[in-house]
């Protein structure tokens, strides 16, 4: 059929690009097979089309950030979350120690400072750290439409090298943006990043955002529409870190990347798209993933600023 054939053709076109490298700062990610490559389209009416390595599991990493932001907004309300984490693009790298100078508030929920804070806002206040992680894994699973698990090896590997995220969390604690033990929150955030997904799962998660917060296959309403609008807006402005402007002009789809090589895009009312390829560019975005999205956007006129 035409869509899988098209996907296979485009995967073939980007496969010769061997530039970039799997994330090195998490040792367990550095050993990923760099040739893995897959792409999935999931429509809002529940059609799923894929090609390549679409059922290989890898860790979700920063693609967990918009979804956990959605959970925090649902669990605590907009005012409580916005009081702690802003919505301004930082134009800086994902792991920058970037806080508003007067309040110590992280600039947005897509950079690590914001995402660590958002993790602490998922579920009710005063939850035990392990119960908070359960709330997050259950919420991510609802977006995917199947129960997801944590990769313990990746989790341990990141935690053993988490000096920078621990530094960020201690800064946040000193400003009272975090109010619990910073180490426990970083552990929970890293468990959140270590949730295993496939490109097929990520496309369903993105399709749930595209479908007003209802998973197109399970039919479950995971989040309400005002939360979807907030999350997609932040993805559009901050999802690709210091490459967000290039992405907005070249691709024009609200998106989020992760350092294990996943990349998602969500087009409201239309489709969720996911790609997987572990080699990263200097921003920490998948090299072939960015190329694939550029192709999809221009071939099918998916840029949100273009009249279809
Ligand atoms: N767990 C990773 C970190 O905190 C996620 C980074 C990413 O995927 N951009 O460094």
Image (spheres, rainbow, N blue to C red):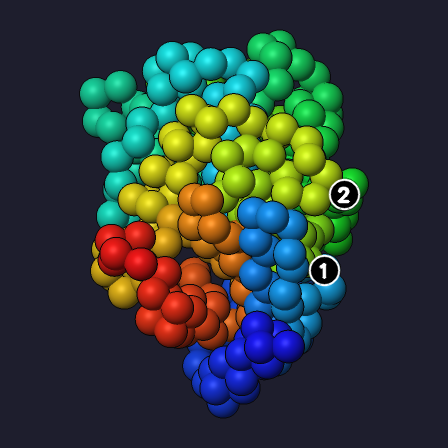
Mark number, residue 146:
2
Q: Which residue is mark 1?
A: 57
**As drawn, 16 above or below 281:** below
Residue drawn at the location 72% of the way across and 60% of the way down: 57
- Residue 292 lies in what quarter of the image? bottom left
Q: Residues within 10 Å of mark 1 (few under 14, many from 20)?
A: some
Taking the view exactly as shown, the residue that stands out farthest to the top is: 126
Taking the view exactly as shown, the residue that stands out farthest to the left is: 102
42 relative position to 164: left or right: right
Q: Is residue 302 visible?
A: yes
**As drawn, 129 above or below 196:** above
Between 237 and 19, the residue placed more toward the observer is 237
Q: Is residue 194 visible?
A: no
Query: Which numbered mark, 1 or 2, is in the foreground of this view?
Result: 2
Between 280 and 161, the residue placed more toward the observer is 280
SS class, disc 1: loop
**As drawn, 178 above or below 156:** above
Residue 285: percent from left, percent from top:
43, 62
182 relative position to 231: left or right: right
Q: Residues within 10 Å of mark 2 (few under 14, many from 20)?
A: some
What quarter of the picture does the N terminus occupy?
A: bottom right
SS class, disc 2: loop
Residue 58: percent from left, percent from top:
67, 59
């Amino acid at each position: 059929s035409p869509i899988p054939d098209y996907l296979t053709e485009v995967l073939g076109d980007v496969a010769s690009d061997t530039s970039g490298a799997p994330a090195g700062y998490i040792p367990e990610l550095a050993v990923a097979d760099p040739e893995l490559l897959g792409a999935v389209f999931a429509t809002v009416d529940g059609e799923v089309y894929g090609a390549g390595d679409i059922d290989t599991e890898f860790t979700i990493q920063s693609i967990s950030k918009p979804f956990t932001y959605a959970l925090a907004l649902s669990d605590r309300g907009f005012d409580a979350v916005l009081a702690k984490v802003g919505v301004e693009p930082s134009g800086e790298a994902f792991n920058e120690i970037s806080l508003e100078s007067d309040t110590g508030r992280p600039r947005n929920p897509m950079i690590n400072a914001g995402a660590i804070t958002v993790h602490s806002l998922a579920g009710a206040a005063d939850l035990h750290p392990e119960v908070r992680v359960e709330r997050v894994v259950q919420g991510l699973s609802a977006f995917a439409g199947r129960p997801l698990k944590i990769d313990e090896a990746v989790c341990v590997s990141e935690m053993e090298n988490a000096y920078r995220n621990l530094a960020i969390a201690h800064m946040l604690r000193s400003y009272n943006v975090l109010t619990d033990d910073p180490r426990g929150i970083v552990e929970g955030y890293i468990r959140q990043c270590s949730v295993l997904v496939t490109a097929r799962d990520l496309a369903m998660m993105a399709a749930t955002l595209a479908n007003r917060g209802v998973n197109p296959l399970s039919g479950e309403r995971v989040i309400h529409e005002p939360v979807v609008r907030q999350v997609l807006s932040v993805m559009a402005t901050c999802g690709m870190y210091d490459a967000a402007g290039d992405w907005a002009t070249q691709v024009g789809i609200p998106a989020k990347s992760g350092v294990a090589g996943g990349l998602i895009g969500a087009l409201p009312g239309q489709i969720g798209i996911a790609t997987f390829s572990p080699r990263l560019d200097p921003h920490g975005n998948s090299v072939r993933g960015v190329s694939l999205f550029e192709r999809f956007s221009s071939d099918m006129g998916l840029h949100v600023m273009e009249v279809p």
